[in-house]
Image (cartoon, rainbow, N blue to C red):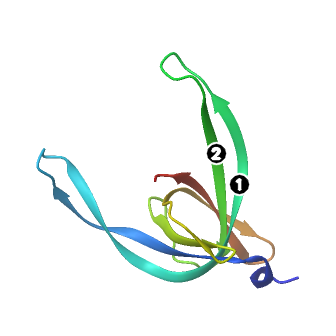
């Protein structure tokens, strides 16, 4: 079974282009699309319930995105326009880690994601 047959989803990758100061003097990033229609597979890796003094219960979900090995992705890029089984996902995800997976050559990349919207 080839990797392409397992990559059943599709997404776009955005990278920070420039920064500008907003009305309060905070740096705000603008993004540009670097990869369109990338074949991928989103996996819900784990879920846990967190609790602290200020909130009752917060569900924290860890996502992984599998992409082909030579994909142009780096930490701090954003994943957006994710299409899961023909249905668009309106969420955006920040890439927090890029983990190469090798056999005899670079097979695929496993991206750790944090949901940002």
Q: Find residue 57 and name its label.
A: none
Q: Which residue is mark 2?
A: 61
114, 70: nearer the viewer: 114
Q: Residues within 10 Å of mark 2 (few under 14, many from 20)?
A: some
Q: Earlier in the sequence, mark 2 or mark 1?
A: 1
2, 79: nearer the viewer: 79
Does residue 21 lie above or below 36 as drawn? above
Judged left or right of residue 70, residue 8 is: right
| Number of numbered discs visible in the structure rendering | 2
Q: Quick check: marks 2 and 1 in contact, CB under 8 Å?
A: yes
Judged left or right of residue 79, residue 70 is: right
Question: Where residue 77 sits: x, y (%)?
Answer: 45, 64
Question: Where residue 9 sits: x, y (%)?
Answer: 66, 75
Element marked by disc 2: strand
Does residue 114 lie above or below 78 as drawn? above
Question: Where residue 35 sits: x, y (%)?
Answer: 48, 80
Question: Where residue 8 sits: x, y (%)?
Answer: 72, 77
Q: Residues within 10 Å of mark 1 (few under 14, many from 20)?
A: few
Q: Find residue 44 and name its label.
A: 1
Element marked by disc 1: strand
Does residue 22 lie above or below 110 as drawn? above
Q: Kindly identify the residue that appears in the image at 66 percent across and 31 percent down.
A: 49
Q: Kindly identify the residue that appears in the image at 78 percent across and 80 percent down.
A: 3
């Amino acid at each position: 079974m080839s990797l392409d047959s397992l990559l059943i989803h599709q997404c776009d990758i955005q990278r920070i282009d420039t920064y500008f100061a907003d009305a309060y003097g905070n740096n705000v990033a603008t993004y540009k699309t670097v990869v369109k229609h990338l074949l991928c597979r989103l996996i819900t890796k784990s879920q846990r319930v967190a609790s602290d003094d200020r909130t009752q219960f917060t569900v924290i979900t860890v996502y992984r995105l599998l992409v082909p090995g030579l994909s142009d992705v780096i930490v701090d890029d954003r994943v957006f326009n994710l299409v899961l089984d023909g249905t668009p996902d309106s969420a955006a995800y920040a890439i927090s880690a890029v983990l190469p997976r090798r056999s005899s050559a670079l097979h695929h990349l496993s991206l750790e994601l944090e949901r940002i919207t």
